[in-house]
Image: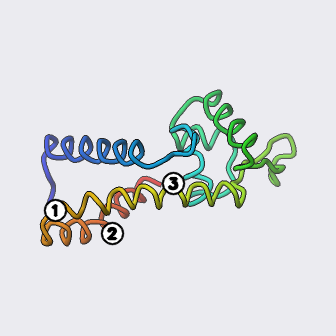
Amino acid sequence: MTIGDDAALQLVISLNRLTRSLRRAASAGGIQPTQLAVLALLSRQQGPSRIGEIAAWVPCSQPTATAAVLGLESAGMVRREPDPTDGRASRVLATERGRAAFADLARGEAEVLSKRLASLRPHEVRLLAEAAPLLRRLAEAGD
């Protein structure tokens, strides 16, 4: 079964609005949106990555990815290591501090969402809980 383009568009808009509103409501600790995307990539999805890979995944330009990494590096949230396959290049990886900061941000967003879920009817909360694994599969389908 498929849904129409209009329904898919409304779902995308709703998910984006929800994500933005959760990030605004939860404390980001001074981490910029691009930096947060980089931390997510390095902490949970890909592990150590080159700047070009980060830029492609976020997505952003390589200079933007470099700036985000430099900011995170100066905060001690990421570090660089030599790329084992290319001695001229380096890979970026999240430090323990970076992984902890990302986890704290996610927990803050989850707390905000939990409070908002309290305004829904019990069957609506169950529907959303049942949809969570499906949304994860959709998110991972593009990886």
Q: Nearer the viewer, mark 1 or mark 2?
A: 1
Q: CA distance from mark 3 to mark 2?
A: 21 Å
What label does residue 133 carry, if any?
A: 2
Residue 46 image offset from top left, x and y in percent? 60, 57
Of the numbered discs 3 and 1, the one sitting upstream in the chain is 3
Crowding near the residue tagged with mark 1, few <14, some 14–19, many ≥20 C-alpha atoms within 10 Å = few
Q: Residue at x 42, y 45 (%)?
A: 23
Q: Depth check: 83 or 119 in front?
A: 119
Residue farthest right in this picture:
87
Distance from label 3 to label 1 (Cα)?
24 Å
Horizontal side of 2 relative to 98 (left or right) equals left
Tell me the kind of residue under disc 1.
Answer: Leu
Q: Is residue 72 above or below residue 120?
A: above
Instruction: Name the residue: 87% across, 46% down.
Output: 87
The quarter holding residue 98 reads bottom right
Q: Earlier in the sequence, mark 3 or mark 2?
A: 3
Q: Which colour scheme appears in the figure?
A: rainbow
x then y, percent, for residue 51: 68, 40
Question: What residue is disc 1 on?
Answer: 120
Q: Which residue is mark 3?
A: 105
Residue 74: x percent and y percent?
A: 75, 40
Q: Pick the residue in front: 110 or 49.
A: 110
Q: Which residue sits at x=40%, y=42%?
A: 24
The three-letter code of the residue at mark 2 reads Pro
